[in-house]
Amino acid sequence: MELNELKKAFLEAYNHEAEKVYFSPGRVNLIGEHTDYNGGHVFPCALSFGTNLLLAANNQKALRFKSLNMPEIICLPLDQLLTPLPDNSWVNYPLGCIAQYIKRGFKLEQGYDILIWGNVPAGAGLSSSAAIEVVTACAFNDIFNAGYDRTELAKIGQLSEHEFAGVNCGIMDQFASAQGKKDHAIYLDCATLDFELVPVKLDGVKVVISNTHSPHKLDSGAYNARVAECKLAVEQLRTVRPNLQALAELSEVEFEDIKSAITDKVALMRATHVVGECQRTIDAVAALKAGDLTKFGQLMNASHVSLRDNYEVTGLHLDTLAEEAWKIDGVIGSRMTGGGFGGCTVSLVRDEAIPTFIEKVGAAYFEKTGIKADFYIAEIGDGVHALAD
Ligand code: GLA
């Protein structure tokens, strides 16, 4: 939607004009899956599509929220901003961020009207919720004059997800939405939050996102179970490595040596994925920097296999898209991206192979699942920002 259409929608909803407009993107992760909450590296990039937030002060002593995807306006008095709304209301994503500011001692002296619109497909594993969180964190950073940097905005978004959405996620999605840069991926060390922006303008190759449109979205129960299984693996490894804080601290060789301390079979599989994926991510970024795309693609494929077999977060829909992609000449690599269970795959595809890729993968996927997949050529965009009037 164009900016002037959004401003018109704001005026129609609230009978006065928007004063500020912000944007924050969705993300696609190239490699490093389920490593963030284990202290490992990730390698996501921000997308050119995301969420817009428009706002203006009102004289209501309340915050009013409207999403252009929902019919109603939700009105919350200023003294009722610290508790999530029932029934997984979408308002919990922005509200959770505002609550973080209030908990830190910032006070809202007046009410605001807020309008949100986004074009990240919901439930596609492209971080539509992180985009809402980070755009809200950024807008209220200005309102409160808090002076937080982008990393702090990402942390506010992550806390909102933990406390108001009940998902114990890592920092990757919010970090990518906050710190993204056009034509770059973010090589982030989730243990220290040090990061490097790595150029991903690939000659004759595109990043293609394939959407399963699978009905099984990442549900918070299955995600939180994985987080708990990794924690159990660390606890059991502490019997032989008392100082171990996170799985990412172990090299593959060290892990081999001590993994028998993990007596829980499932926890052992999860840890095997994490330790391998941490190394793959480091190797993949080194390969990309050295111009070795073939190696990068092989590591993407290996990442998918491990997410399928050890982490068990793929399933028929994601597996079909990835496995069909691997069969096509000109596909450098393909894997699921994000939390898993449904959502999207990410593939590196040579320009000349893209039409065949879309046709063949789409047809095979439809034959197996009865669902029409969607394909997008990803444009890597900038992180959260205010838009000029
Ligand atoms: C979801 C979470 C992230 C990360 C990925 C898996 O997107 O929000 O923090 O754990 O899953 O890599």
Image (cartoon, rainbow, N blue to C red):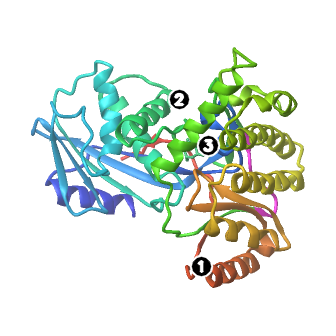
- Quarter assignment of residue 93: top left
Residue numbers of the magenta segment:
198-205
* Alpha-carbon span between mark 1 and mark 2: 40 Å
Taking the spot 27% from the left edge, 44% from the top edge, the residue there is 55
**As shown in the figure, which amino acid type bears the numbered disc 3?**
Lys
* Residue matched to label 3: 181
- Locate residue 9 relative to residue 248 in the image: left or right: left
- Locate residue 58 relative to residue 172 in the image: left or right: left
The disc, 2 or 3, on the residue closer to the chain's N-terminal end is 2
Q: Is residue 378 visible?
A: yes
Residue density around tag 1, few if under 14, some if 14–19, many if 20 or more, within 10 Å: some
- Quarter assignment of residue 9: bottom left
* Residue matched to label 2: 151
The disc, 3 or 1, on the residue closer to the chain's N-terminal end is 3
* Alpha-carbon span between mark 3 and mark 1: 36 Å
Taking the spot 69% from the left edge, 42% from the top edge, the residue there is 265
Residue 144 position, x and y percent, is: 30, 26
**As shown in the figure, which amino acid type bears the numbered disc 1?**
Thr
Q: Which mark is residue 239?
A: none
